[in-house]
Image: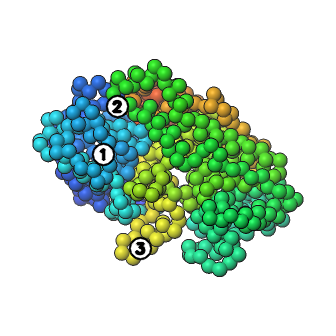
């Protein structure tokens, strides 16, 4: 992995001084046994020597020899190939390398016994003789290892360590609690975390410009300390699942509101309190119009979504080439049978229905369970369709903070970070990201972010360093940060410089994006086609680990690349018109873009090989205000 500076704090001392830092001072160049790169606080657990690693969807006849190791953060494979990790045309993560996987990313572990494989769970007895293991990750990457030539006992020891560290039983066993790198936040202030009441005030003022309409909604601090107290609000909330009252999400210019509301507790038979809440929402409308209630639990549930994705994931992570070709014969019918796209369609349909009611000036109440799963998906989609602000990167991240993080989506349970019998794993976040990807494909000029951003976000959800996706609610997050014995340093996943350099981050920016003025949100409503026949498969996210499906020197990425080149030409012309003579090929202002990229770039399965490059101008050299606002194409070289 490429050596980079260790944090986001910018030091202005001479470069030579940085280069003379002691070994281990940087999280990205710290070395330990067997040349394994360790982060501060990461510790080596065990290893297996002479392990064979097989490529995904291979015939298992040839493998790459190396050392397979387990730390308290990752599973890592180090080969004897001197060029391993170099000369690559792929995304470079500062926290882990291409031949690593975070332990919290591991979904299933299978042990090879004879000619068969058996799924192992924490607490299972590990066979004394382990022939090999097959691992499926939550981001659908697969790993296949053989211990045929390893010393006796290496396979068993490694598998025992993997089962212990990959499925922690307590929250404070996640690596984020051990990670000791100092954190200097470089988070953009435009990203609202909605942990402070001021963010909610600002959102109310932004969405409800008419002060007369704004008075119908008020911000409450009754639960500021996460304690129940005697009040009308809390008394009413106790009758709903999760003790949650209805929550305002968004309003349009006509005063129609989008509200998330839980269902009544199963023990409550009297619906009076629910009707009171409906009436309160009606009274909040400027014309006292009754709200429309959309029930989101008809034919869909957290469990059904989990089952659908489990079936779909098996199609995206074949164990060998024979299984791949068997599935390929009737792949689309197999996809249809999983019902994954059916649920994507369902969420988009409900979002469109809600938008139609809001457009007519009617308030909409989204209702399901505790209001923290499907409500999060649909309410977030509604705001993407109606409000262009949420289609830029900072707005989108603020939307996830508001509707998911502050809204109490149980990330820890749904993503399976902690091994519990009572938790219900289900990829609700991925379902939402898939819906957003569908919108991105249908309206490519409406979103500032690319599919690479969405794919990277799904990967980041399984890195147990960032607090954004490892808690079930804000109360848990605050408790962890204020623990007197072992406080957790809160690191936001939106601080992308913690993981990537500027060149990788700029691949998040859509060169086709056409931003709209904030005041014109009513004029730029988007209405997607949501029938399954109109949906596509998100290849970059689901199939990037299958080399057989990668298109060499082709694919959708080339369209985006040439769009970046065209935008670069436009910027150069604007500079000429405004009299700026800076050379676009100046090293300080440009860098080389790879031209023979593959369809899954920047998640390519192969090394870059012979790269043809072209200089791309950095927008930082643009002098005028209009040029500074132009879409950045690429970043400068180091």
**In the figure, is residue 637 to the left or right of 535?**
left
Disc 3: CA contacts within 10 A as few (<14), some (14-19) or many (>=20): few
When asked about the image quadrant of residue 576, the answer is top right
Residue 264: % across, % down: 66, 61
Give the mark nearest the N terminus, 1 or 2.
Answer: 1
Q: Nearer the viewer, residue 231 or 140?
A: 231
Residue ID for mark 2: 319
Disc 1: CA contacts within 10 A as few (<14), some (14-19) or many (>=20): some
Q: Which mark is residue 637?
A: none
C-alpha distance separating marks 1 and 2 = 16 Å
| Identity of the residue drawn at 20% across and 44% down | 127
Residue 86: % across, % down: 30, 37
Residue ID for mark 1: 120
C-alpha distance separating marks 3 and 2 = 43 Å
| Identity of the residue drawn at 82% across and 64% down | 283
Residue ID for mark 3: 483
Residue 605: % across, % down: 37, 31
**In the figure, is residue 43 to the left or right of 148?**
right
C-alpha distance separating marks 3 and 1 = 34 Å
Q: Nearer the viewer, residue 188 or 356?
A: 356
Give the mark nearest the N terminus, 3 or 1.
Answer: 1
């Amino acid at each position: 992995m490429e050596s980079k500076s260790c944090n986001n704090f910018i030091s202005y001392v001479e470069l030579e001084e940085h280069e003379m830092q002691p070994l281990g001072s940087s999280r990205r160049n710290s070395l330990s046994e067997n040349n394994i790169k360790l982060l501060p606080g990461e510790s080596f657990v065990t290893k297996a020597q002479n392990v064979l690693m097989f490529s995904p969807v291979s015939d298992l006849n040839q493998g790459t020899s190396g050392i397979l190791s387990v730390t308290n953060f990752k599973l890592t494979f180090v080969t004897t190939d001197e060029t391993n990790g170099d000369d690559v045309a792929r995304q470079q993560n500062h926290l882990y390398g291409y031949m690593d996987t975070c332990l919290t990313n591991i979904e299933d572990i299978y042990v090879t016994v004879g000619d068969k494989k058996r799924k192992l769970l924490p607490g299972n007895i590990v066979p004394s003789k382990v022939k090999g293991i097959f691992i499926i990750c939550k981001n659908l990457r697969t790993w296949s290892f053989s211990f045929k030539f390893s010393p006796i006992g290496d396979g068993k020891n490694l598998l025992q360590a993997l089962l212990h560290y990959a499925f922690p039983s307590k929250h404070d066993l996640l690596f984020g609690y051990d990670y000791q790198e100092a954190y200097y936040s470089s988070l953009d202030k435009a990203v609202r975390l909605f942990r402070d009441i001021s963010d909610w005030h600002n959102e109310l003022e932004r969405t409800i410009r008419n002060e007369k309409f704004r008075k119908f909604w008020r911000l409450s601090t009754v639960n500021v300390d996460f304690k129940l107290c005697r009040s009308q609000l809390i008394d009413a909330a106790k009758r709903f699942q999760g003790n949650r009252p209805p929550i305002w999400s968004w309003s349009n210019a006509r005063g129609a509101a989008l509200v998330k509301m839980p269902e009544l507790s199963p023990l409550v038979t009297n619906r009076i309190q629910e009707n009171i809440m409906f009436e309160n929402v009606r009274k909040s409308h400027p014309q006292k119009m009754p709200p429309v209630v959309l029930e989101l639990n008809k034919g869909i549930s957290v469990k059904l979504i989990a089952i659908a994705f489990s079936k779909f994931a098996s199609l995206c992570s074949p164990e060998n080439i024979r299984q791949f070709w068997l599935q390929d014969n009737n792949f689309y019918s197999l996809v249809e049978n999983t019902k994954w796209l059916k649920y994507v369609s369902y969420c988009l349909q409900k979002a469109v229905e809600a938008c139609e009611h809001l457009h007519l000036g009617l308030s909409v109440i989204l209702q399901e369970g505790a209001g923290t799963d499907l409500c999060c998906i649909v309410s977030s989609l509604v705001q993407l369709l109606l409000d262009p602000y949420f289609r830029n990167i900072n707005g989108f991240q603020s939307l996830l903070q508001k509707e998911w993080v502050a809204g109490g989506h149980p990330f820890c349970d749904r993503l399976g970070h902690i091994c519990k019998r009572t938790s219900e794993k289900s990829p609700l976040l991925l379902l939402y990201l898939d819906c957003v990807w569908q919108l991105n494909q249908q309206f490519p000029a409406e979103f500032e972010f690319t599919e690479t951003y969405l794919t990277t976000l799904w990967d980041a959800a399984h890195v147990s360093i960032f607090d954004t996706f490892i808690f079930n609610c804000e109360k848990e997050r605050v408790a962890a940060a204020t623990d007197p014995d072992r406080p957790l340093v809160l690191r936001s996943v939106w601080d992308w410089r913690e993981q990537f350099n500027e060149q990788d981050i700029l691949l998040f920016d859509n060169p086709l994006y056409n931003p709209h003025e904030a005041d014109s949100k009513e004029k730029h409503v988007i209405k997607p086609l949501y029938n399954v026949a109109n949906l596509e498969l998100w290849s970059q996210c689901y199939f990037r680990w299958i080399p057989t499906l990668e298109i060499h020197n082709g694919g959708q990425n080339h369209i985006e690349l040439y769009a970046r080149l065209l935008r670069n030409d436009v910027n150069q012309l604007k500079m000429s018109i405004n009299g700026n003579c800076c050379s676009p090929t100046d090293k300080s202002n440009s860098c080389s873009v790879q031209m023979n990229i593959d369809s899954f770039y920047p998640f390519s399965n192969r090394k870059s090989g012979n790269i043809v490059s072209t200089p791309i101008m950095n927008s930082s050299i643009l002098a005028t205000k209009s040029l500074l606002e132009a879409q950045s194409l690429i970043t400068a070289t180091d």
